[in-house]
Image (tube, helix red, strand yellow):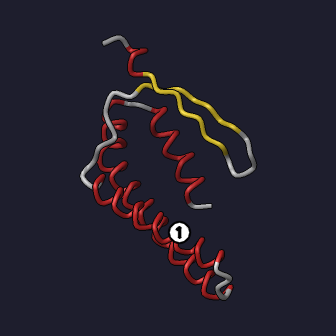
């Protein structure tokens, strides 16, 4: 397979509205040990967030809404930790072994954004 066939273009919109695009070559898929668990966690967080939206629509107490938003933030952060752990155990180990500096640099950028 030619190298360009594995090229993937990513577009990200930062919090300040800046659009960042980059292209890199994927030599592997991103299916890991915890993919199903991550999908389940995200589905629960989405459902929880939709219930919070209904709380706001129904005029529920702001304190209750804030508590529920806090729970969703914690769930999303914990899901991010699972993704990061999988990424380190699989992709980063491969990147270190193959000397893939780009993947390592992308991990640093992702971690910086995740922990803000």
Q: Quadrant of residue 99?
A: top left
Q: Position of residue 112 (x, y in %)?
A: 58, 53
In the image as oriented, which residue stretches furthest toward the front? 58
The answer to which of 47 and 38 lies nearer the viewer is 47
Residue nearest the observer in this picture, 92 or 23:
23
Q: Quadrant of the C terminus?
A: bottom right
Q: How many marks?
A: 1
Q: Quick check: 25 above or below 87?
A: above
Left or right: where 104 falls relative to 66: left
Q: Measured along the vertical axis of the image, is residue 2 above or below residue 15?
A: above
In the image, residue 63 sits, relative to residue 82, either above or below, namely below
Residue 31: name its quadrant: top left
Q: Is residue 16 left or right of residue 49?
A: right
Q: Position of residue 63 (x, y in %)?
A: 65, 88
Relative to 28, 8 lies left or right: right
Q: Residue 51 placed where, x, y %?
A: 52, 73
Helix, strand or loop at label 1? It is helix
User: Which residue is painted at 39% across and 16% down in the image?
Assistant: 5
Name the residue located 51 percent from the left edge and 40 percent from the top edge. Answer: 106
Q: Residue furthest top?
A: 2
The N terminus sits in image quarter: top left
Q: Is residue 13 left or right of residue 90?
A: right
The foreground one among 81 and 79 is 79
Which residue corresponds to mark 1?
49
The residue drawn where x is 32% and y is 35% is 29
Q: Position of residue 102 (x, y in %)?
A: 49, 32
Q: Residue at x 45, y 36 (%)?
A: 103
Task: Check disc 1: other Cα within 10 Å, few if <14, some if 14-19, many if 20+.
Answer: some
């Amino acid at each position: 397979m030619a190298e360009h066939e594995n090229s993937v273009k990513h577009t990200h919109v930062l919090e300040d509205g800046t659009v960042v695009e980059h292209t890199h070559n994927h030599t592997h898929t991103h299916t890991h040990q915890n993919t199903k668990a991550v999908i389940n966690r995200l589905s629960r967080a989405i459902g929880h967030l939709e219930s919070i939206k209904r709380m706001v629509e129904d005029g529920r107490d702001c304190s209750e809404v804030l508590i529920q938003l806090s729970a969703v933030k914690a769930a999303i952060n914990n899901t991010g930790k699972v993704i990061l752990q999988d990424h380190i155990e699989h992709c980063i180990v491969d990147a270190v072994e193959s000397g893939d500096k780009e993947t390592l640099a992308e991990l640093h950028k992702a971690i910086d954004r995740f922990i803000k």
